[in-house]
Amino acid sequence: MSTALLSDNSAWADELRHEHLRPVPNVRRQMLPTFAGLCLVAADIGLVSGAFMLAYVGRFAADDSLPMLGLDRYIRLAVLVGLFGSALLATHGLYDLERPQSWPFRLRGIASSTSTALVLAFTASYFLGDQAFSRLWLASGWALSVAALVIWRRLAHRCYETLRDALWPANRVLIVGANRLGRELATELKSGFQVVGYVDNGSDLEDLEPPLLGPIAQLDELVQAYAVDELIIALPGGRREQVSRVLARGFRRHVQVKLLPELGGQLPERFQVHHFGGRQYIGYRPAAAVSWSKRVVDLVMLSVGLLVLAPVLLMIAVAIKSKSSAASISSTPGTPGRVAMAI
């Protein structure tokens, strides 16, 4: 008798199908990161300049007797730090909102960019004739800038993702693997998603709907060209090495990667995957239950065997004992009355 366990590979597809997603306008969606990046540049310049001016107020407003330059020179240096800082932040990739970095890299990029920007701005002010800036003001302005940028960047990325998901929910899907599992998944997702095609290395894969877009080596270019939001890996375990290398390099746009392994590659050999009614089942043959009668028969047969072999085993033990543990007593020549025992 066989037992079947239901394993529904389409659970993820069924869950997402109820979200009622709509097609994405590619041009407007691609313009959103650019517009948001420009807004982020302007906000960073204003934030850094404001941090240095806040440090100016804290340093000089309480004591008017302190020697200081004109306010316009402090404003000019603060704006220069903001401009240089935004340019250096761009070199660290901190304006690529589709590929947000982790907070340690973000913190390192902000601290490094702000420090370098302060050095460049101070050097420029030196050639402009401004040489008497307060060192305490410079240090406090730098610290306020770093803290403000770290907090602001975290909030900005969350606001961007919330706005992007609200305006254009992710629904463009690219399936890696044009095998049976990948085709089944494309059929299940087509009612709620826009499946742009397959990516696979097979050269004989024709008449596919959606089409085969290219090999796995071009996965990064295809994700960028088709503005893919969801990347689903439907390859068996033996064919994921190349995909793993591509995923390790990362993509130039933000994309969600999901792994959907084939059940047959995840089960022991004694299990089998059966297809019944359009669904997959894990079939196996359970071990037969051991009855009390079988246990009694086993115990009786074991006892009879021991009784039959007992005399033979006893004779073997006596023979070994008689040959190996015999002792001889002899008198040593030339020494009357003395006895030596040799074993």
Image (cartoon, rainbow, N blue to C red):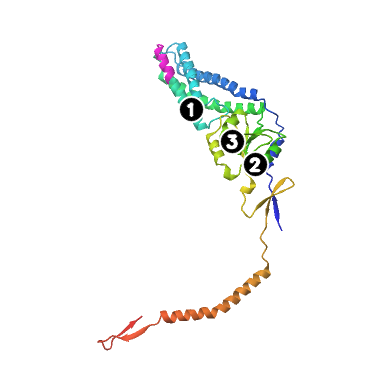
The mark that comes first in sequence, 2 or 1, is 1
The amino acid pointed to by label 1 is Gly
The amino acid pointed to by label 3 is Pro
Task: Based on the picture, tell me whether residue 342 belongs to the magenta stretch.
Answer: no
What is the magenta range?
Answer: 119-129
Q: Which of the two marks, 2 or 1, is nearer to us in this view? A: 2
Residue at position x 65%, y 72% from top?
A: 297
Query: From the image, which quarter does the N terminus lie in?
Result: bottom right
The mark that comes first in sequence, 2 or 3, is 2
Mark 3 sits on what residue?
A: 215
Q: Which of the two marks, 3 or 1, is nearer to us in this view? A: 3
| Left or right position of 151 against 67 | right
Evaluate whether residue 66 shows in this view.
Answer: no
Are there few (<14), some (14-19), or many (20+) residues within 10 Å of tag 3? Answer: some
State the separation of the CA atoms marked 2 and 1: 43 Å
Mark 1 sits on what residue?
A: 109
Q: What element carries label 1?
A: helix
Residue at position x 42%, y 15% from top?
A: 124
Mark 2 sits on what residue?
A: 179
Pointer 3 with pointer 1, Cβ within 8 A:
no
Q: Would you identify the image quadrant in which residue 203 lies?
A: top right
